Amino acid sequence: MLRRILVTAVLVSACGGGGGTPGSLRFHNRPVVWLVNDRQPIPPIEKAGQGLVVYYLDQDLIAPSRLALTVDDERRAANVNSLGEVPDSSWFTNRSPTPAEVRRGPGRGGPDRSGPFRVTGVKVGGVAIGITVLDARGDRYVLKFDERGHAETETSADVVVQRLSWACGYNVPENEVVTFARGDLTLDPAAVMSHRAGGARPMTERDLETYLALVESDGGRFRALASRFIDGKILGGVEPEGKRAEDPNDRVPHELRRDLRGQRMLWAWVNHPDLKTANTLATVTDESYVKRYVLDFGKALGTWSRIEHQLGFGYRRRFGLHDAILSLVSLGIWVRDAERWIAFPAYRGLGYFDAESFDPATWVPNHRWRPTDLADRFDELWAAAILLRLTRQHIEAAVAAGSYSDPRTADFLVRTLIARQRKVGNYALSRVAPLTALVAEPRAQSLAVCFDDLWLRHGLNTPDSVTTYRATGHNYDGSPTAVPGPWVVAHGAHSCVTVPPGSAHERYTISRIEVRRDKTSLPPVFVHAAIGPAGWRVIGIDRR
């Protein structure tokens, strides 16, 4: 993390203000790509994966040692279009859902409750218990329960974060909070009990009663997360590095995908520290291409900290050498400020989740996850721009889907998510010039480049702060078309600067735009524009 901060400081000091030239990067004068053709049918492939012990050893011990000897560790994301955005693919979809759509979520809106759940088996993983059932439509679900003594924590957290992740563009399972009585469960004649060591036997009513006695219940009623089985052939989790060799559609190394790297801002926002391959899923769809999902969010929103009674989740690694040494030499006295005890409201279902101790710059998952570990300020700007599009109404809709019985829990969670959202915005939008929605417009003898400034659009400025912009025009070969223009004061979120247009290659023009917040300069952004079939258009953005 220190390396991340030092690299950012060097970049800002080197690129801010008057430095920086167009360089050698040029863009093709053609429409921007917004859809990746990665849904071509592929040959049959088999499930692959590794056990959790081997996985943790590799990611927490072996991989860091190997990467310490790697020089090329600062590569930018590779799966972006000429504007730095992530096109739609089998991994990610650019969405603009309404609050009502967030409340409903993806899929069918939950299981069909017109008949009882037919129990087909029991899933046991660690201390978690899941009962597999069929709903009245015949769709398969797993019912996951809260740990005893922690009612409404994991079930609610999972659905809230699932809704927010879906709203941000990711593929997620169809999850819904359900309540039912014992009489709403019937045992399917084909129900079986599977043993860890292999083999199975028919499941009995007594087996079902035994497992129901282990889960949280309230006056004979049960509350569960109903998660619909994902369609397609299950291949296993998503690898944090490299590509799946059997999938010709998988053309970008996973550690270089902006949609994976940018998740660092999303997971920091909701404090989802349980990142690992086992909490992702790759399936072969009925159309014979691989689709990737993120799943299992029950430990987010401070739920894991509450259950384990630890504040460290999201602030340190499970196996962090730095923290271990400091704790050892101080004989256990040293702890991070964020891990000092905070008095949380005793609201039903609320995890240990706050905004005061949250710092997006230092947030880390419990175990190393290569894509988010590699996230740079450009990945984080992309992700923060998506998060900031979610309004209070979107967040309220996601929290409502969590079905908290205490309205104080929902209110606290909404307010905390909004406060953390602003912290994410302050962090990510202060390190890169956050100019977006760029367009090029001809004006008399000049070319106007107009844009939205996300810092101002989302009200992250103070009332007395002043934002100014200055532009310098360049030809295709990088030579300046004129001296830098005057500084333009922003009087709102939308502004324009003007430069002389280029003289060759469809009037190819490179506009170097500088941004100042009071006396602080941000790294410049180079906007590439040219004349296309329908007139001037922005064909590429080079952020520094």
Image: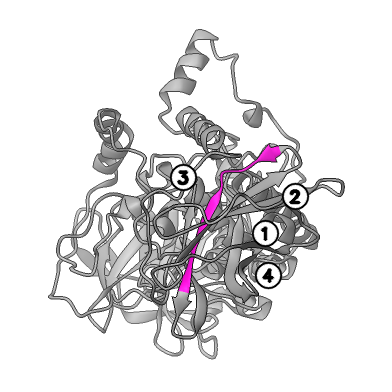
Q: Residues within 10 Å of mark 4 (few under 14, many from 20)?
A: many
Mark 2 and mark 4: Cα distance apart in space: 29 Å
Mark 2 and mark 3: Cα distance apart in space: 24 Å
Residue 385 placement (x, y as % from top left):
59, 59
Closer to the observer: label 2 or label 1?
2
From what the image shows, is residue 282 above or below residue 57?
A: below
Closer to the observer: label 3 or label 1?
1
Q: Which range of residues does the magenta coloring cover?
A: 520-530
Q: Which residue is mark 1?
A: 453
- Identify the amino acid type marked 1: Asp
From what the image shows, is residue 118 above or below residue 238?
A: below
Q: Which residue is mark 4?
A: 394
Q: Which residue is mark 2?
A: 467
Whichever of callouts 3 and 1 sits on the residue coming sooner in the sequence is: 3
For residue 272, say whether it is visible: no
Residue 169 placement (x, y as % from top left):
49, 69
- Identify the amino acid type marked 2: Thr
Residue 528 placement (x, y as % from top left):
48, 63
Whichever of callouts 2 and 1 sits on the residue coming sooner in the sequence is: 1
